[in-house]
Image (spheres, rainbow, N blue to C red):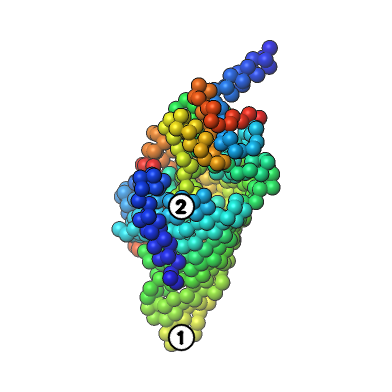
């Protein structure tokens, strides 16, 4: 029973955030370690060899849930990670959005873009990845 | 245009000038930070500041702009201001200014004034909000010497070779020119040894860094080597450093709430000073330093940790002379009020004065031991 409860809890938390990509990205699933690599700037290459470009939400429950469930990081920790790359001249900060609808619109028109939204946000124009 | 720094400044300026439409201006990214410290010590004055009387003499700020001209080309620059007691002065320096062209993830090139990747933290050590520590380990990342070693004018080849999902090899290979910073502790240390430069010496900085993000999530192993030269004029002679070697070996673990790292570095130099009318004098230097540190996120906003840093001047002759060693036990904490504002508190328990202390602000001599308290308030965006 405890195992069943744990599975239900995991499924419930997972359902709160969807990982979305531009429809041109060929993969249908992504692992948590790939997600962490992509969203911390460690690596932008997926297992099929394709390259993606992360976009972030500024704040909100979807952002918090994604950070804690999928990246195991705090909001400050993620910002520190990116800002170290920006201030050392290694990278620019990913595109950041205040609204999930704007994020979906950007991902739909930007090849390789990858982001995350809540389940209630309309997302017909993008592809949803299964997180394994 | 022969000066690479000037070339990139012109390129950056041209790029910004071309970015006339609202969309293009919206693509420009601006980021910055500012930090102010209060430092108090029990005995010796530290880092060129009057710390025995509680000093507010450490202020830092930086501002950068990035323009992603295309998917492959990025240009940008960063200005940096630092005042550290008698060092830094009220001047703003170009921290980096470069063009960055990435052919693919495996190969990119940066040219202009480029940060030097050496050891775990050389290229990020002047971004204060990036650390829990107020002071990084002084024997390896000396805050009073870093202006000399942060960046070079030249080019860097870089890339990531992905060998698996959690198996990435990252490299940096660089070559360029540098000069001693005119107003930091590096020049002052030479001056206190009787080597008085007419102008800051300079030289070449070939080197590389190789770091492996291992299959163990959060674990990175790496090594760096910089081979540098220097030459210049003294007030009463000449100065030369033939090829000097600065290797480093390091490991870092950073996953979930836990952070730990360690690094060993060695600096092997031969300073040749030739005073007017005298034979050249060769001074070999062999400085060895290491640190080990760890931290833990008690809450998403509160982090605490500790480190130990060790230094030995192996050519000093007497390892028990406090001038030839330095050991520092450190306890630190950081609280983030928000994603932009933070407060740091740090205690140091120092034995020996081989690094970080100067005769100029300790005219009555140095005690063997000194404790320090550092508080720092910072803002970043």
The chain ID associated with circle 1 is B
Alpha-carbon neighbours of circle 2 within 10 Å: few (<14), some, or many (≥20)?
some
B9 lies above or below A127: below
For label 1, the crowd category at 10 Å Cα-Cα, with few meaning under 14, some 14 to 19 and many 20 or more, is: few
Report, in whole angstroms, how far the alpha carbon at label 1 lies from the one at label 2.
56 Å
Near-viewer residue (B187 or A32):
A32
Q: Residue at x 40, y 34 (%)?
A: B338
Query: Can you say whether B176 is above or below A38 in the image?
Result: below
Q: Is residue B56 visible?
A: yes
Q: Which residue is tagged 2? A: B69
Q: Is residue B210 above or below residue A118?
A: below
Q: Residue at x 49, y 51 (%)?
A: B70
Q: Are marks 1 and 2 in contact (CB under 8 Å)?
A: no
From the top left corner, tell me how far across and down residue B92 is, in percent.
34, 58
Helix, strand or loop at label 2? It is loop
Q: Chain of mark 2?
A: B
Is label 1 in a helix, a strand or a loop? loop
Q: Residue at x 60, y 18 (%)?
A: A9
Identify residue for label 1. B278
Of the two numbered discs 1 and 2 on the same chain, state the one appearing first in sequence.
2
Q: Are marks 1 and 2 on the same chain?
A: yes
- Rendering coords of residue B288 (x, y %): 57, 60
Furthest toward the bottom, the residue is B277
Q: Please state the horizontal and vertical placement of residue A50, each as a whole percent of the image.
A: 63, 43
The image's mark for residue B216 is none
Q: Write the residue at 60% across / 44% down.
A: A51
Numbered disc in front, either 1 or 2: 2
Which image quadrant: the N terminus of chain B? bottom left
Give the quadrant of residue B181.
bottom left
């Amino acid at each position: 029973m405890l195992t069943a409860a744990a599975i239900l809890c995991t499924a419930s938390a997972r359902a709160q955030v969807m990982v979305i990509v531009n429809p041109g990205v060929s993969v249908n699933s992504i692992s948590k370690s790939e997600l962490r690599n992509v969203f911390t700037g460690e690596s932008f290459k997926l297992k099929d060899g394709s390259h993606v470009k992360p976009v972030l939400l500024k704040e909100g429950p979807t952002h918090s849930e994604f950070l804690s469930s999928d990246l195991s990081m705090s909001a400050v920790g993620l910002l520190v990670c990116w800002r170290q790359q920006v201030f050392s001249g290694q990278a620019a900060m990913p595109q950041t959005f205040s609204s999930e609808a704007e994020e979906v619109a950007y991902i739909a028109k930007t090849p390789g873009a990858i982001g995350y939204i809540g389940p209630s946000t309309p997302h017909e124009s993008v592809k949803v990845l299964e997180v394994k | 245009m022969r000066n690479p720094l000037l070339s990139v400044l012109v390129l950056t300026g041209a790029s910004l000038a071309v970015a006339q439409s609202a969309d293009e201006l919206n693509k420009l990214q601006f980021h910055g930070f500012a930090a102010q410290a209060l430092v108090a010590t029990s005995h010796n004055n530290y880092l060129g500041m009057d710390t025995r009387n509680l000093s507010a003499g450490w202020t830092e700020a930086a501002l950068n702009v990035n323009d992603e001209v295309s998917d492959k080309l990025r240009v940008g620059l960063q200005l940096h201001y630092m005042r550290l007691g008698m060092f830094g002065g009220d001047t703003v320096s170009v921290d980096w200014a470069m063009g960055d062209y990435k052919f693919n993830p495996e190969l990119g090139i940066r040219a202009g004034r480029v940060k030097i990747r050496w050891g775990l933290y050389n290229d990020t050590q002047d971004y204060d909000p990036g650390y829990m520590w107020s002071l990084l380990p002084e024997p390896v990342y000396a805050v009073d010497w870093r202006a000399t070693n942060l960046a070079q004018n030249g080019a860097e080849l870089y890339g990531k070779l992905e060998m698996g999902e959690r198996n990435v090899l990252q490299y940096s290979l660089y070559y360029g020119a540098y000069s001693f910073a005119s107003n930091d502790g590096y020049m002052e240390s030479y001056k206190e040894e009787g080597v008085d430069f007419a102008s800051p010496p300079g030289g070449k900085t070939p080197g590389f860094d190789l770091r492996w993000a291992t299959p163990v999530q959060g674990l990175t192993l790496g090594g760096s080597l910089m081979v540098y030269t220097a030459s210049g004029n003294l007030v009463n002679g000449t100065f030369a450093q033939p090829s000097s070697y600065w290797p480093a070996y390091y490991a870092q673990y950073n996953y979930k709430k836990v952070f730990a790292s360690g690094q060993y570095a060695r600096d092997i130099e031969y300073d040749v000073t030739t005073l007017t009318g005298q034979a050249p004098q060769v001074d070999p230097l062999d400085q060895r330093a290491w640190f080990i540190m760890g931290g833990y996120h008690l809450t998403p906003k509160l982090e605490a940790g500790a480190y130990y840093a060790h230094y030995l001047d192996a050519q000093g002759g007497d390892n028990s002379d406090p001038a030839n060693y330095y050991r520092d036990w450190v306890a630190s904490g950081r609280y983030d009020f928000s994603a932009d504002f933070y407060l740091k508190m740090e205690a140091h328990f120092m034995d020996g004065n081989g690094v970080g202390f100067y005769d100029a602000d300790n005219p009555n001599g140095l005690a063997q031991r000194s404790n320090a308290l550092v508080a720092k308030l910072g803002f970043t965006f």
